[in-house]
Structures are given as structure tokens and as C-alpha cells.
Image (cartoon, rainbow, N blue to C red):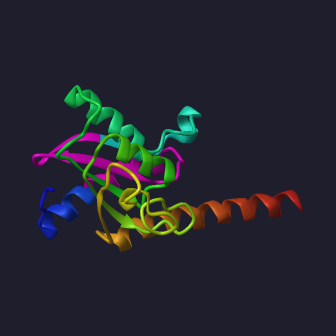
Amino acid sequence: MATFSETEKAYYMEQALLEAQKSLAKNEIPIGCVIVKDGKIIGRGHNAREEKQQAILHAEVMAINQANSFEGNWRLLDTTLFVTIEPCVMCSGAIGLARIPQVIYGAKNAKFGGAESLYQILTDERLNHRVEVESGVLEKECAGLLQTFFKHKRALQKAAKTENNI
């Protein structure tokens, strides 16, 4: 497992937040991810479900695909995945299948979390691959980005509903 200083963790999470901003610019749920190996980012991803109209285009899946291409291998051994929100069930499965040994995320995902909140897929001893999980890195910034997005989205929906009732 790679060992990162708090400064390094913050730097890589900031890179994941930059990826999340790409989603935000496209009116997507702002989630971003980077995969790091030997101090270098080898995969980047951001949520692109709406843009591409593909259910599986989560930030983690995009980053895993890019890292697989970079490595020329489906196994992403000796890597760390940084993501702004706790991986969902699908992404947790993909992380395990890619053999990523370490995940560091920002904010909990109380409604869809597959790493700790609802399910513990990454650490489930019944599975043949377990992942070291750490949460809370730049949690306030990661959660704030999502909260702002959904607050704005709800305000737009309310305004549209009010406008239609006039």
C-alpha cells in the first residue's frame, strides 16, 4: 500500500475535485476521480452519464479505463484511487475487479455508498480482493460541491414549477 502524507492526499483529492468541476460544467453530478501510481496520475475521470447517456460512466469507471490503457493491463496493482465521494456499489465492484489496493475518498455517500455507508464491498472478507479504504480527505470541499449542485438543481426545478403554475 502506498503511504501518502496529508499534503499529498490533499493534492490528489484537489485533482479529483478538478475532474468533478468538468462534470459540473456539463450540468452533471460533480464527481471526480484520479488514480495514482508511483506519485504519478495515470487515470482521470469525471461523471459523464448525462453527456454520454451511458449509465456506467461514473468517474471511477472512466479513471479505471484510462489507467488500464496507460498500464496496458487490467490489473491496477500498486495504485491508489482518489475520488470525491464514496464509491457506489458498481464502482466498488469495478475497483475490486481492477485489483486496486487502496481507495481514498472525500465525502460519504449515504444513499448509494458501496464502500462503507450502505455496503462494505471493498473490505468484505468473502471476496477474494480487499481494498484499504480511507475517507474524509477534503470532505468539506467534496460534500460542499455536491450540496451546492443539488441545491441549485432543486431551486431550478422549483422555479420551473412555479413558472408553469402561473
Q: Quadrant of residue 46?
A: top left
Q: Quadrant of the N terminus?
A: bottom left
Residue lying at 66% horizontally and 64% vertically, measured from the top left: 154
Q: Is residue 124 left or right of residue 155?
A: left
Q: Quadrant of residue 68?
A: top left
Magenta region: which residues?
15-43
Q: Is residue 11 visible?
A: yes
Residue 144 percent across, percent down from the top left:
44, 70
Residue lying at 47% horizontally and 59% vertically, measured from the top left: 114
- Per the image, is 32 magenta? yes
Farthest right residue in view: 166
Residue lying at 67% horizontally and 60% vertically, measured from the top left: 156
Q: Is residue 132 left or right of residue 106?
A: left
Q: Is residue 42 above or below residue 85?
A: above
Q: Quadrant of residue 87?
A: bottom left
Residue lying at 32% horizontally and 40% vertically, measured from the top left: 98
Residue 138 percent across, percent down from the top left:
30, 69
